[in-house]
Image (cartoon, rainbow, N blue to C red):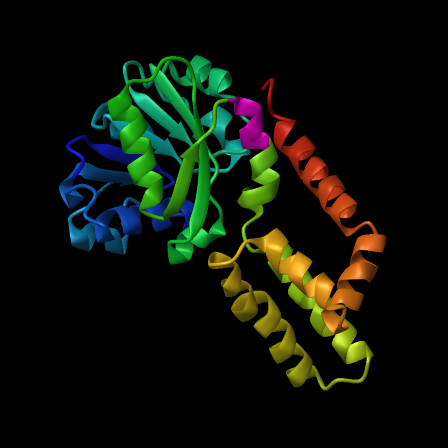
Amino acid sequence: MIGQTLGIIGGTGWLGGAIAQAVLAKALLPAGNLIISNRSGSHPLAQQGVRLVTDNQALVEHCDVIVIAVRPEHFASLGIDATGKTVISLMAGITARAIATQTSASRVVRAMPNAAVEIGQSFTPWFCLGETDAQTRDLVQRLFESVGTAAEVQEESFIDYLSALSGTGPAFPALLMTALSNQAMAAGIPADIAQLAAKNVVVNSSQLLAHHDAQQMIDALVAYRGVTAAALQVMTQGHFEGQIGKALQAGAAVARKGLHT
């Protein structure tokens, strides 16, 4: 259990709220050591012993570690002084240096969870600015492991690229599932059957990858030279991997737009 006091600015939004719920569910810290801020100062989390405030600076003053879970465009108006504190940013496109400059925080961590925090299955890469003690690193790792898996990266630019990869959460699988079901319907398959088949491929069958190497699975299916091999060959010839690369680069470019703000 963490002995420090944790504050979440934006702690009743979808991301901050999911982290707050997970921290309590995993007993990462006592409810009384969690403070969240929102405009109303009220939320059902208060019934579990969480403290709620409407003033972000008041939250900062009572916390050792502050998580900023607001939209990037709202950061400039926060106006908090976090001198001597650890700030963990969940905002895309705002550098750790910019956060340290505006907040005067002693330690800044940038992290990028995704929508799977809702089901405790997010992958969260994180980056520490400058020298950060082992205790802080352990806290950050445990915090994000409460909503899935996490890993520290050594270069801040990786966070921007991973914003377009893991940060997109279910977006790519959702696009694939939609494409599969739409193509099946275009081939005359009834909509309900098409959607069930596409969902099985994306949601259910993909769970095999938790226990099998992806490339080995592809190689084995191609070697069989059957229906799946024919489909994979068309996707390969259509530069599928190249299109994925372009998509990730485009997303990363958007994530980097705020690098010097």
**Horizontal and vertical percent position of residue 68:** 40, 33
**What residue range appears in magenta?**
155-160
Residue visible at 37% across and 13% down in the picture? 104
Residue visible at 78% across and 72% down in the picture? 183
Q: Pick whichever, 57 or 159, lies toward us.
A: 159
Q: Is residue 35 above or below residue 86?
A: below
Residue 56 left/right relative to 223: left
Q: Pick whichever, 105 or 212, lies toward us.
A: 212
**Horizontal and vertical percent position of residue 227:** 76, 73
Residue 37 left/right relative to 162: left
The image quarter in which residue 198 lies: bottom right
Residue 52 lies within the magenta run: no
**Horizontal and vertical percent position of residue 59:** 26, 30
Please state, as top left, top right, bottom left or bottom right, where the N terminus lies in the image: top left
Res 243 seen here: yes
Magenta stretch mostly in which secondary structure?
Answer: helix
Residue 78 left/right relative to 206: left
Residue 91 left/right relative to 56: right
Q: Is residue 189 above or below residue 1?
A: below
**Horizontal and vertical percent position of residue 171:** 61, 54
Please state, as top left, top right, bottom left or bottom right, where the C terminus lies in the image: top right
Res 54 seen here: no
Q: Pick whichever, 6 or 150, lies toward us.
A: 150
Q: Is residue 237 above or below residue 204?
A: above
Residue visible at 55% across and 64% down in the picture? 206
Q: Is residue 261 above or below residue 72?
A: above
Residue visible at 68% across and 67% down in the picture? 178
